Amino acid sequence: MPFLEESYDICVVGAGHAGCEAALACARLGLETILFTISIESIAMMPCNPNIGGSSKGHLVREVDALGGQMGINIDKTFIQSKMLNRSKGPAVHSLRAQADKAEYSRLMRITLEHTEGLTLRQAEVTDLIVEDGKVQGVKTHSGASYYSKAVILCTGTYLNARCLYGDVVNYTGPNGLQSANHLTKSLREHQVEIFRFKTGTPARIDKRSIDFSKMQEQSGDDRVIPFSFTTDPKEVQIDQVSCWLTYTNDKTHQIINDNLDRSPLYSGMIEGTGPRYCPSIEDKVVKFADKERHQVFIEPEGRNSNEMYVGGMSSSLPEDVQYEMYHTVPGLEHAKIVRNAYAIEYDCINPRQLYPTLEFRNIHGLFSGGQFNGSSGYEEAAAQGLVAGINAAMYVLGKEPLILDRSESYIGVLIDDLVTKENHEPYRMMTSRAEYRLLLRQDNADLRLSKKGHQIGLVSEDRYHWVIEKERLIDQEIQRIEHTAIGANAAVQKLLEDHGSALLKTATTLAELIRRPELCYEDLADIDPQRKELAADVIEQVNIHIKYDGYIKRQLKQVKEFKKLENKKLPERFDYRQVKGLRIEAKQKLNLYQPVNVGQASRIAGVSPADISVLLVYLEQSNRK
């Protein structure tokens, strides 16, 4: 019986947030791309929280946008509430977060995919890799059809051998009751891919009409919304927003949970996978933080035209009857009706240390991967990896240099470096604390940091590239003007300082020195700055930050310079470190296993000591002399 055979440049498996970014990047770079999904209706689905962004995750979305990705554009058109988090802190940790209309987000991403030239959507389950002589040749589907390609990108999310659990109920499905992918893991293992078993979960969805909002605190969006995408006109996102609501658990809630822990598959032993430390279930919170009298519960709308409300902070795998009982103890949820039960989900993913920083598999040429399949969590982490995997698969096919972002230039670089060098025994979540140079890697300057790379790759347009160049010029020009504009202690200046609670001048100073005062900013000084020109809000923001944090920025730039010295010391490919005398046995084993691309990456591998790095540096210097 003959089977279907087709050929493409690139096959992408999975149409979640990683798969969408990967497929769009490949097609936009001129490669014939096919995107496989188990269900066309599940494209860019949000099976858990109904939002994009958040602490550190907002940075990732901004960086995806700066490189030419789609997530920021999509959320700007489908959000229902937006807020800049951590405003009371410094700009390094400011993070944009938007509540999404889930259905609209998915619908718009599907439209984008369907209207992208060179991109084919295919509803089918991929069951096998086609690999010959250590090089991927394509994929096979459950029907027996073969799709040949020059590269393959795996973005399977939480679907591989997935099962959803609550109480003693086990459903062998992917998220939201969708079909799981039950065959690909076997093929991966046959090709010596190491598989992990991870777990995540989601809270219940409840009927909006059954909630008493009078017992909760209303959470509104920002008065002035800042878009995620640098291409979005800020005027277009000033819309009527939908409120979220805050309530809390209490002693009764915790007692019910403690009394029923033996019925939770998380504690009964039914769940095999490792769950996320930084997004625990309510059972975990109650057990591990027994001293806490209450935990926050955010009630978030799933869409503008939906009555489903997401119970943020109460992810659970407890039985259905216990879920009702515990939710009903929360103020405002006394009569809540559950639309969808909370559940835990287990799934197969890979050990990401099998990957190069390009997200290509070390032992299979042309095979790339991204997203939760790489052992990470979150829509934003997935999109970032998907974009990088898509770019590098395209570069591989086109015979061009890959994109490798390091820790000093992007959160995406931190994310990927952590995945491929560190031992992650649980789903990896991005956090601002993971970024050593976070003052330089702010969400507000992602375009200045990465748009040139996006343009060089071919995903950022000429017009957008030239605006970034012009923006840099305007920022530098205005900083120089401010630094050299003298201000005397005249009556107008003293009045302005007094009005802002700032110390009066005793001698002349500069505008820059006034801006460095904590209580003052660039815009506060407009009345005493007659030479000031009209500038865009994003230019003013950069001027203000650079002047206020000048000393700290210079210090981090100096640290980056030292960091780059190690990053620029390249290590040989597929090298046998047993021949390097002086390395400890553990270091030789780890270096042979991970095959770092440079000395900097080698220094971050667990089991490789500073002394081992010194030995490596000596070895490289001696090798270069030969």
Image (cartoon, rainbow, N blue to C red):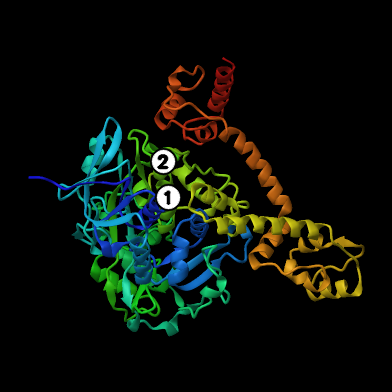
Label at residue 398: 2
> Could you say where residue 270 lies in the image, as x and y percent from the top left?
23, 53
Q: Residue at x 87, y 68 (%)?
A: 504
The one nearer the camera, 324 or 622, is 622
Numbered-mark total: 2
Label at residue 29: 1
> Could you say where residue 602 lies in the image, as x and y percent from the top left?
50, 32
Label at residue 103: none
Q: Are marks 2 and 1 in contact (CB under 8 Å)?
A: yes
> Could you say where residue 185 lies in the image, as x and y percent from the top left?
24, 44
Quarter that holds the C terminus: top right
Against 331, residue 366 (above or below) is above
Name the kind of residue labelled 1 in the image: Leu
Residue furthest top in the image? 626
Q: Secondary structure at mark 2?
A: helix
Q: CA distance from mark 2 to mark 1?
A: 9 Å
First reached walking from the N terminus: tag 2 or tag 1 = 1
Give the left or right position of residue 550, taking residue 166 as reference: right
The one nearer the camera, 450 or 429, is 450
Categorize mark 1 by other alpha carbons within 10 Å: few (<14), some (14-19), many (20+).
Answer: some
Q: Residue at x 33, y 59 (%)?
A: 201
Quarter that holds the N terminus: top left
Give the left or right position of residue 587, taking residue 205 as reference: right
Give the left or right position of residue 343, taking residue 591 as reference: left
Name the kind of residue labelled 2 in the image: Leu
